[in-house]
Image (tube, helix red, strand yellow):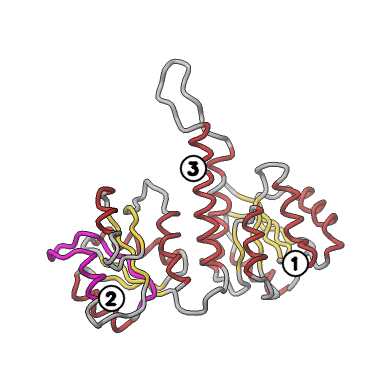
Amino acid sequence: MTASVLLLIDDQQLRDKLTGYLAGDRFVVTQGQALTSSSQVAATIAQIAAANPNLVIMDYLGEDEASVKVLQSFVDLGPGVDFIFVDSARQAEPDKIMLAFNEGVRAFLSPDISAVGLVNYVTRALEGPARFRGGFARPDSDGGSPSLGGDSHGRLRSRLDSSLKLIAYLLSTPLNAQPRKTLVLSDSPYQRELLRKHLEDHNFTVLTAANFDDAVTLTLTEKPRTIISDYTLDDGKTGLDFCQALKFANKYTPCYFVVCTANMDKFSEIMTPGNGVDDCVLKPSPTSSLNEFLASVAAGLLL
């Protein structure tokens, strides 16, 4: 299905670059008049309403919260148009960024965004909210299996939105200039490849290790900022052993350590004070949402 994207970017070079990034069969891109003054809010709203796009990618204008006002006018009307802001002037402050997320913007990007990065954010903006637009069905009248609805629907949507906001804030804004280098330790080639792919899609540089010794060596030489380790390893060690080898054996390199497990009963043991583990998450799979997993890993960028 083709999605329509309206670009409201003032700088012609950036506008053409983003248009080129989205060229292809998946998106129909239209260029419009950028919002450059708070006095243009009404005209910008009218322009977007006339174009009726699926997604608006626009310059962020902090003056009198102009961009947020444009966003609010469509959010108040209900689902239909999603927004991505681009900090073309590189002047957005963290509190303004969070205000935009709280009002419903789907991403807040740097003008240096790569082609792969932009397509990933656009795809998530278009596909993520779509699963909620039609709501969730109630139980069938003939007694068939019920699907999610009511309060459960609301809690799930709130949880997803919170995760997306945290991911977008940590991964799409220049809050931290250090490399997003991450090490994945798993004795499963499938698990390593799954995590590598999803982390690289979010602009992480990913190192992988299949065993305890290689992981320790890579950590000490490459100094990744975040580490993701399986709880159970083939060589008889665990993710806790790996964490303790780094943090409690005079080999400590600053890192944010996440342990993955498929067994929820292990959570308390893993997160016992003194183990040195920063977070524990269930192993993601192709059939489960990766948002909370990615948010947990991205939290390490705050260190």
Label 1: which secondary element = loop
Q: Amino acid at mark 1?
A: Leu
Residue type, numbered disc 2 = Lys
Q: Which residues are magenta?
A: 224-247
Question: In 3D space, how far apart are the residues under numbered discs 3 and 1 (Cα atoms)?
Answer: 32 Å
The residue wearing badge 2 is: 247
Which of the labelled discs sits on residue 61, or is there none? 1
Secondary element at tag 3: helix
Q: Residues within 10 Å of mark 1 (few under 14, many from 20)?
A: many
Badge nearest the viewer, 3 or 2:
2
**Relative to 78, residue 272 above or below:** below
| In the image, residue 226 lies in the stretch drawn in magenta | yes
Task: Report the residue at 69% width, 50% height from top.
Answer: 53
Which sits in the foreground, 232 or 133? 232
Q: Position of residue 32 (x, y in %)?
A: 77, 61
Q: Along the horizontal axis of the image, is 47 left or right of 211?
A: right
